[in-house]
Image (cartoon, rainbow, N blue to C red):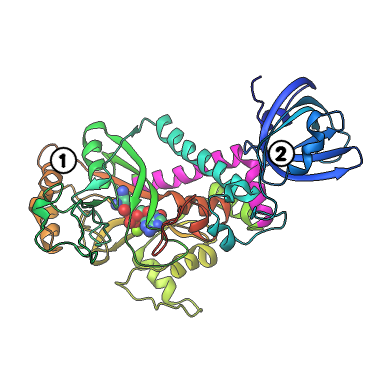
Amino acid sequence: MKRTRVVEALHAKNPLEQILIKGWVRTRRDARGFSFLEINDGSCLKNVQIIVDESVPAFAALKDVNTGAAVAVEGQLVKSPGKGQKWEVHATDLNLLGPADPHTYPLQKKRHSDEFLRTIAHLRPRTNKYGALYRIRSESAFAFHRYFRDRGFYYLHTPIITGSDCEGAGELFRVTTLPVDSTGEKQEALTTETDFFGQEASLAVSGQLEAELAACALSDVYTFGPTFRAENSNTPRHVAEFWMIEPEMAFADLQDNMDLGEDLIKNVTTDVMDNCREDLELFARFVDKNLMQTLDAITGQTYERLSYTEAVDILTRAKIQFEFPVEYGFDLQTEHERYLCEETFKKPVIVYDYPKEIKPFYMRLNEDDKTVAAMDLLVPRVGELIGGSQREERYDVLNGRIIENGINADDYWWYLDIRRFGTVPHAGFGLGFERFLMMITGISNIRDVIPFPRTPKHLEF
Ligand code: 4AD
Ligand code: MG
């Protein structure tokens, strides 16, 4: 018999004579002559209730059907007389597929802390909260793809192993096949020339540079892939491995870029709110009571746009004491970004035209010679969600910026070449997928929106 998913059973139109349900036991309650099982198979937040009475052959063995065990149940789907559910299953047969020892199974009926659940990341998707999160994560990924596909953007796969440092921040994980000696140190005699690629290689911090090449042929492209940063900072907003969505548009300037960022977030957020209502309600109830209000502000309002200079002006006049003082020429910290969104404007904010010294070489130099056409899109509670810019399309200016930044121009000959043949204004940005999930669920630690987080000194699972 074909397995009926719990979500299908719960949304059935009519009673069903014979169905097969498989899943994991959330609870078992015993009464005289029968037992209630709550079963979940991850297809939705709700469990299906199973009633097993003495007529079922396995009734005597029910004592081994404990929380965490996997079971297969055959039976009839009937109207439930109980409160809180429309349907229940009257079992005619039950099979214990995989037992779970009730004394060692770590998930009990009570609520567990996020910190504890991180230590059992292999089991946490079996809780309501993380099951909901996994489903929202999946739906969100599709919503991004749908958004771009509907607008003629092509999905581009950029390399994960790379020889260039896009952001120039030196946060690279090296990739090497050089053997290590007994002390764990790289052997002196072996050099990069003898290494696999014959040159230094690392994991990509961004797919942008390659996305630019493709945009200068296909006009509108986007990437959606894993990126890696060896930032040795333990913050609730940084992980060493995260997923980034990077659209890149030819024939576009900073204005177009800001418009795309705002439209993208509004559309995808609306899409996820429509498709994951039940799961999102869990977060609005247990994680962030103001979640729906925040999301309404994100989808329903025009985002504030102001220059870096204006932002610094507001922040230096702020009546609160920041941990990091604000000064023109310094990068904005999360506390500043959140102040602008949460206190000043009470909605998302786009800050543009940053001083060139604090931004990478590829951003387009403005007329003032001091700032670049950068944009960061900031959202309440999270801070920076998007970072992007119009790109420097003028060969000589780009070459100058490369030299100024102490970068070896020879390594970027292909990037410069695009500026020699049919160069056009183009722009794009990177959106941190985990930051988006923090925004949409209200979860405040990035370790809890990615199934298996990688952070300094943590590489379990
Ligand atoms: O601002 P970033 O560094 O921009 C770039 O990498 C550009 N090359 C993107 C582009 O223009 N195509 O990173 C983009 C976004 C950030 O705004 C943030 O949301 C996320 O990526 N991000 C991280 N997310 C989780 N953990 C980290 N360590 C992150 N670093 C950046
Ligand atoms: Mg950034």
Estimate the x, y position of residue 290 in percent, counting from the top left: 64, 58
Q: Answer with left or right where residue 112 lies relative to residue 453.
A: right
Q: Which residues are magenta?
A: 257-286
Estimate the x, y position of residue 151 in percent, counting from the top left: 40, 32
Which one is in front in this view, the residue at disc 1 or the one at disc 2?
A: 2
SS at circle 2: strand
Mark 1 to mark 2: distance in Å? Answer: 59 Å
The question of residue 270 being in magenta is answered with yes
Q: Is residue 46 above or below residue 15?
A: below
Instruction: Assign the magenta stretch its main secondary structure.
Output: helix
Q: Residues within 10 Å of mark 1 (few under 14, many from 20)?
A: some
Type of residue at label 2?
Ile
Q: Is residue 194 visible?
A: yes
The residue that label 1 is drawn on is 423
SS at circle 1: loop
Q: Answer with left or right where residue 174 lies relative to residue 435.
A: left
Tell me how many marks there are: 2
In which quadrant of the rendered image does the N terminus lie?
Answer: top right
**In terms of depth relative to the viewer, which is nearer, 65 or 378?**
65
The residue that label 2 is drawn on is 39
